[in-house]
Image (cartoon, grey):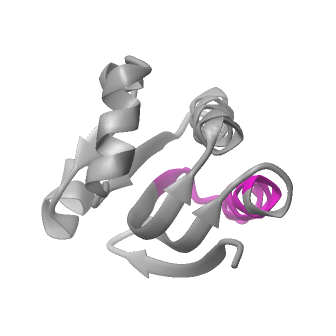
Amino acid sequence: MSIKVTTRQVDGVTILDLSGRITLGEGSVTIRDAVREVLAKGSNKILLNLGNVTYIDSSGIGELVSAFTTVKNAGGELKLLNLTKKIHDLLQITKLYTVFDVKDDETAAVASFTK
């Protein structure tokens, strides 16, 4: 199973609920397209909810970094929500945990975006 993306809006923040596997190929392309689509619609506050992501490989991690850079270059903010233990550990090992703004609570995450 590859990645599924559901998009919703909460207080001006676009939340992308991801579920499945973020892997080389379809999984990483799906995230890239979803982030670009949100930016194209003029929203640059993006929260990636990773609570239902079962697996992520190195290209998936690369895609998160790429999405982060794309959003930042567009003058926006990208934050991560609900990391699973595996993804949390992976971000710690790769030292990317310090790059991303990671939240555990959706309400607090939405409130943390600059107005």
Give the position of the N terminus as an image quadrant: bottom right
Residue pictured at 66% horizontal, 33% vertical? 62
Residue 6, given in percent of the width and then of the height, sits at 57, 82
Q: Quarter-wise, where is residue 7 in the image?
A: bottom right
Going 69% across and 58% down the picture, which residue do you hit?
31
Looking at the image, is 83 positioned above or below residue 63? Answer: below
Q: How far from the left and from the top, in percent, is residue 78?
A: 47, 44
Quadrant of res 111: bottom left
Q: Is residue 50 visible?
A: yes
Query: Is residue 32 toward the left or the right of residue 90 in the image?
Result: right
Image coordinates for residue 3, horizontal then vertical, percent = 66, 72
Image quadrant assignment for residue 40? bottom right
Number of numbered labels in the structure image: 0
Residue 66 sits above or below residue 12 on the image: above
Q: Is residue 18 left or right of residue 62?
A: left
Relative height, residue 52 to residue 109 (above, below): below
Q: Which percent across, then down, holds residue 49?
A: 40, 65
What's the residue at 46%, 40% (across, down)? 77
- 41 horizontally vs 13: left or right: right
Dominant secondary structure (helix, strand or loop) of the stretch shown in magenta: helix
Q: Is residue 49 magenta?
A: no
- Which residue is drawn at the image coordinates 46% and 58% (left, top)? 48
Query: Is 1 or 75 nearer to us in this picture?
Result: 1
In this rendered view, identify the residue nearer to me: 43 or 37: 37
Q: Which residues are magenta?
A: 28-46
Q: Is residue 114 visible?
A: no
